[in-house]
Structure formats: C-alpha cells, structure tokens
Image (cartoon, rainbow, N blue to C red):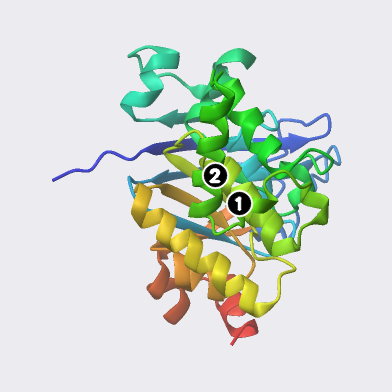
Amino acid sequence: MHIQPIVELKNLTKIYGKGCNLCVENTGPEHETNICVNCNSLVACGNVSFELYPGETLGIVGESGSGKSSLLKLLNFDIEPTLGEFYINHEKINTFVGNEKVNLFNLNSFQKRLIKNHIIGIVYQYPYLGLRMKISAGGNIAENLIMAEWRNIEKIRKKISELFEKTELPIDRMDEQPEKFSGGMQQRVQIAKALSNNPIILLLDEITNGLDVSVQARILDLIRNLHWQHNLSIIIVSHDLSVIRVLTQRTIVMKYGRIVEVGLTDQILEDPQHPYTQLLVNSQL
C-alpha cells in the first residue's frame, strides 16, 4: 500500500546575495564550496528535495554550513526561498488553503502565519530565538494560544499547566521568566510552546546543543515520548550522530547545501556509502 507523505519538498533553493543563473551549477560538494565564483553569492540550499511520512522522525545531518538549519527556517517560513515547492498533505491544512494542493511558499503572510500557529511547531537551537526571555514562561506559551484564538484566561492557564506537566516543567515556575531557567528548562519551555496548538509537524534544530549529557538524555526521552503520544511527524537537525541514532528512522546527509546521501538511519550509520558520510561517521566513533 502506498503511503502518502505528509511533507513534500521539491527543488528547494535558497541563495543569499544577488544570485545568478550559475549559482547552483557552480556550487555544491563536487566544487567543495557553497560560494558562487561568478557572483559571490552563498547557496545555503540547492535543489533540495525530500519527503516526510506520517509519524516519521527524519534526521538531517551535516557540518556547519551544510544548509541544514537554513532548511528548517525555510520550512517554518522564517526566511523566503529563492525557488522551490513545499506541500503538506493533511486535512487540517485544508481549513487554511482549501482543498487544492498548494505550494505553501506561494501563500500570503497571513496564511503562512496560520500554518505556523496550527500545523508546524519549531524548537530552535538557541532558546532566545524561540522565547521572549523577559516574559514569563507561561506568557510565552499563552502568546501562541491567543494567536490561535484562545480567549478564556482560566482555560489558557489550564492548558499551560498541562503542557508544563507533559514537558516535565515545574508548574509553580509558570510565572517566572525563562532567563532565570537552566538551558534544559528553556528548551522544555520551547517544546511546550511548540506543542501548544497540537501541531502535526515538529521541527527541532540542534535541541541538545550546549546541554550536559544527563540533561541531553532527558530531553531525548521527552521527545521520544511526545512523538509516540501525539503521532508527530518530526524533522530533527543535529550534528550529533548519537542524537540521530536515538531519535530517527531515516537520515539525510547534507554538504554545501546539497543532499549527498539518504537512507535508513541504521544503514547510514553502520554502512555509509558517500565518502563525506563515511568521514562524518568515523569522526564520531
């Protein structure tokens, strides 16, 4: 039986700079650069295509500058693509775009905001990108709920309490500012915020970066449990292959803004085919 992907991404390209018609041709792993020699523009992603399936956790790995974080920002409409198509196949999205299959990059800013508020949740590598540090932790989550037209204060606080419980945050710290929290707790607040409107897709960018090993393990356990509880489809970007091994079923390897290898995570980590993947795996053994 053919399973329809929940996300389809086709020929996604993001160029920083004026760009030219040789940018994609002049960059990539075979050229060992993502800077176009013709116009000096940076190609963060070049013709990236992949699919994400319902309930799947997909890993994206690569060294700094490989384009993996730019990819997540593009999927969350934080930055505009140069080219490309993005489709989400789920009945929940029809409320915002109708029943036609629509390239989400072509939507207006209001429609994109609706999708960010209802369909996609994101947890950034650096909590200050996903949280307002001077507003209470509960207030950060309340903002999301209010944007989704929650109006009753009592119901909002009840929902925040539930999210705190789910992400193993102490409820009595709901009214404290995230700047007073540890790095691990800040990530949990981000996760609670990302889950607040019951997204179907969760984007995770280097969520264990800078955390000590015991905190990392608890965050990974939390993600795994939430994945099963909510049947989330997850894309996780990480340079840490142990995170990828624990959380993902399939893995994409990126270099200089291109996909160089894709396959089952076990296969990629045990028997990498591309020389760059072999180098990545061997460097972390």
Residue appearing at x 62%, y 78% in the figure: 214
Q: Report x, y in % for residue 130.
A: 71, 42
Residue depicted at 74% across the width and 51% down the height: 127
The answer to whether marks 1 and 2 mark residues whose Cβ atoms lie closer than 8 Å is: yes
Q: Secondary structure at mark 2?
A: helix
> Callout 1: 10 Å neighbours few (<14), some, many (20+)?
some
Q: Which residue is mark 1?
A: 171
Q: Vertical placement of 69 versus 265: above or below?
A: above
Whole-percent x, y for residue 40 in the image: 86, 41
Q: Residues within 10 Å of mark 2 (few under 14, many from 20)?
A: some
- The kind of residue tagged 2 is Ser
Q: Which residue in the protein does label 2 denote?
A: 161
- Measured in 3D between alpha carbons, the distance from the residue under mark 1 to the one under mark 2, in whole angstroms, is 6 Å
Give the mark nearer the N terminus: 1 vs 2: 2
Image side of residue 236 versus residue 185, left or right: left
Residue at the extreme bottom:
285
Q: Give residue 263's quadrant in the image.
A: bottom left
